[in-house]
Image: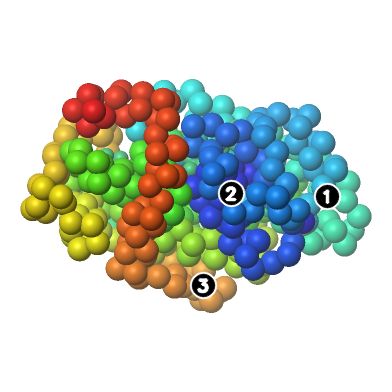
Amino acid sequence: MILVTGGAGFIGSNFVLDWLAQSDEPVVNLDRLTYAGNLQNLASVQGDARHVFVQGDIADAALLKQLLTTHQPRAVVHFAAESHVDRSIHGPEDFIQTNIVGSFRLLEAVRAYWSGLPADAKAAFRMLHVSTDEVYGSLAPQDPAFSETHRYEPNSPYSASKAASDHLVRAYHHTYGLPVLTTNCSNNYGPYHFPEKLIPLMIVNALAGKPLPVYGDGMQIRDWLYVRDHCSAIRRVLQAGRMGEVYNVGGWNEQPNIAIVHAICDLLDELQPRAAGGSYRQQITYVADRPGHDRRYAIDARKIESELGWRPAETFATGLRKTVAWYLANGEWVRGVQSGAYRDWVNKQYGAAVAA
Ligand code: NAD
Ligand code: TYD
């Protein structure tokens, strides 16, 4: 079986659902259920004996030891993190605690467990650390995309905390021989994405008749990947990645934010026209820029393609259409996550105008 951390969040829950759809290998899912963790994401595997959910913190060394000893996983896939850049600007502490201290505790627990395994299980064991392209910093317009050897230049408390965890993972391989793999992926989008991030926030606000807050000039560029493609990349790296290696994962899909917002408005105009008439584009509002806002991210995903034969299956057009359709069909899920904690956050970030 495998141990997944953060499997009730956006990418982790998609990963668990895809894993169980493709294999009978059980998953132990350790998640603290912060504001971003949601068991509703896993409703379709509730009662499935192959999925064991454990609510707990990756920084809890005793719990980690107990889980590893009891379940004897052959692999650990580490998603758990604080993941939202804007939240890291308002309050970095949780990011240091979970992304750095939590990852350190996990590495320590995994090292102790792995050291005690019999030789064949020890040789087969892998720990896959899920990281982000944001550790590489920001690109100028003409710069080549981030390769695995790009220097680390994190600019936000979020990306700095992820960079620190990447360095710890690397050090545990070099120092102790821990069989690790690291993936650095670009921006994901798709079902179960918490509506604090760009794409789901725009869909949810548009449908609610609220402003669509575009930071600064809206010309910051991200490289978007459909979440299930990220999940297939992780499965592939876990299966065949070379021990200790880093694999960059991306969608070959650079887009400025404003183009994303326009594409969402156009899809909604087609699939659920505004009752009041006119385009959802009329709701776009330019707001103050994010402090230290990275201008451009882009992933060079040639290594994972040439070594492991992975390429994304979705284009941005197909993936975004699926995503918008999913949000239209899952209003119940959206209402569920729009709890008090979420509303408080939106108020803090955007003020009453957007949250109203
Ligand atoms: P998310 O915020 O949606 O989910 C994070 C999950 O981790 C939640 O379920 C939360 O409850 C859990 N968690 C948080 N702190 C925990 C703790 N101390 N112990 C146990 N569980 C804890 O994040 P996501 O977007 O699904 O991202 C998952 C991983 O992928 C993160 O490591 C992130 O850095 C990385 N990543 C995300 C993206 C993206 O576009 N979202 C891109 C590249 C990499
Ligand atoms: P986000 O989804 O927070 O991901 P990240 O910061 O990790 O890339 O933001 C994606 C881009 O969209 C980023 O350039 C910030 C911008 N953005 C807005 O313009 N308005 C918003 O309300 C949000 C949440 C993000």
Residue drawn at the location 64% of the way across and 53% of the way down:
45
Mark 3 lies within 8 Å of ligand 1 (Cβ measured): no
Q: Position of residue 50 (x, y in %)?
A: 74, 55
Nearest to the observer: residue 99 or residue 146 = 99
The answer to whether residue 18 is visible is yes
Q: Are marks 3 and 2 in contact (CB under 8 Å)?
A: no
Q: Which of label 3 and label 2 is nearer to you?
A: 2
Q: CA distance from mark 3 to mark 2?
A: 29 Å
Question: Regarding ligand 2, which quadrant of the image does it lie in?
Answer: top left
Q: Quadrant of the C terminus?
A: top left
Q: How is the image coloured?
A: rainbow
Compare marks 1 and 3 and give the one earlier in the sequence: 1
- Residue that numbered label 2 is attached to: 43
Instruction: Give the answer, above or below, for where 223 lies relative to 59.
Output: below
Instruction: Give the answer, above or below, for where 212 lies relative to 183.
Output: above
Disc 2 on helix, strand or loop? helix
Q: For the residue carrying disc 2, how many other residues have a C-alpha within 10 Å: few (<14), some (14-19), or many (20+)? A: few
Nearest to the observer: residue 142 or residue 296 = 296
Mark sitting on residue 310 = 3
Residue drawn at the location 34% of the way across and 54% of the way down:
328
The amino acid marked with disc number 3 is Trp
The amino acid marked with disc number 2 is Ala
- Residue that numbered label 1 is attached to: 72
Q: For the residue carrying disc 3, how many other residues have a C-alpha within 10 Å: few (<14), some (14-19), or many (20+)? A: some
Nearest to the observer: residue 192 or residue 152 = 192
In the image, 117: left or right of 295? right
